[in-house]
Image (cartoon, grey):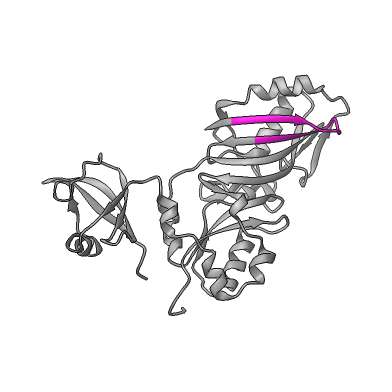
Amino acid sequence: MPQHEPSGVLLLDKPAGITSHDAVGLARRLFGTRRVGHTGTLDPMATGLLILLIGRAAKAAEYLSVHSKTYEATLCLGLTTDTEDTTGRVLSRSQTLPDSAAVLHAAAAFRGNLLQTPPMYSALKIGGKKLVDLARRGIEVERTARPIRIEKLEVFPTDDPALYRMTVSCSAGTYIRTLCADIGAALGCGGAMAALRRTRVGDFALADAHTPETLKELSPDELSGLLLPTETLFKEYPAVNLSLFFEKLARSGCEIYQKKIGTSFPIGQKVRLRDEKSAFFALGETRDFPDGSAVKPIKLFDIE
């Protein structure tokens, strides 16, 4: 492993036709490290924002909070497929399409808190097996509907009466393919997703992302300069600056009692731990101990 391994967050504008795993492989080659992860997959046909975790930042994946996401999608009416998008095997077609007023009315019912059944063609695991692997073998299993939230759903007609553009802001775990299929089912004509582009994940925006073509033209130093600090992944958590004494305790894994550092966070609160110079070095969590509540370091990020 390189002595000075790059570390941080890379915002990638994923093109169509590659998997999220392919994107990870590209980053491994460009940054010269095997330690690369991501915060949420995009299907091969989908494009847009993919957050890659480079070097030590890859350790953050299991501690990330669930962020809302925003997508631009295209709904194709009059069509159903086994994958719920237009890349799948066609199951039915309908020549009778609703007018735009009916489509907008039907879509309105899909705003707010909903229950959504995950598609078979997904990476979700049931009984230790990925649904997509079962689907490819022709096996369909019962799936439990899961709660999701659609914060925003805007639907726009196009010149093609079968195609509608959609802007969707939703909770993590929402399948836009399934949303398209469900809207089509509600209309009685069927529906499938024809295109998908992720434009936002939490506070991270596609406008700040980089294409693979751009990245391939850069030097190692220029690539490293594009990385956002690992701390940006946790900016919704409060920051605590520690004196050198308490920093050493945290680095050795010791709990730090809140009464000693003048904080009063509730139990279970995650916090960003910084040194005297405000440099982030660890993620902590407040826990209950015999002598009171304390901040317990749960992951160090500035050491190997």
Is 171 located above or below residue 105 in the figure?
Answer: below
Residue at the image position 51 percent from the left and 50 percent from the top = 128
Q: Position of residue 297 (x, y in %)?
A: 27, 56
Q: Position of residue 168 (x, y in %)?
A: 63, 35
Foreground pick, 297 / 239: 239
Residue lying at the far left in this picture: please name it.
291
Residue at the image position 37 percent from the left and 71 percent from the top = 304
> Which range of residues does the magenta coloring cover?
152-167
Q: Quadrant of residue 139?
A: top right
Left or right: 292 with respect to 64?
A: left
Foreground pick, 222 / 158: 222
* Marker count (numbered): 0
Is 18 magenta? The answer is no
Q: Quadrant of residue 242?
A: bottom left
Q: Position of residue 60 (x, y in %)?
A: 42, 57
Q: Quadrant of residue 121?
A: top right
Foreground pick, 276 / 260: 276
Is 289 located above or below residue 101 in the figure?
Answer: below
Q: Position of residue 165 (x, y in %)?
A: 74, 35
Is 166 magenta? The answer is yes
Residue at the image position 59 percent from the left and 72 percent from the top = 30
Is 17 located above or below residue 29 in the figure?
Answer: above
Residue lying at the far front in this picture: please name it.
277
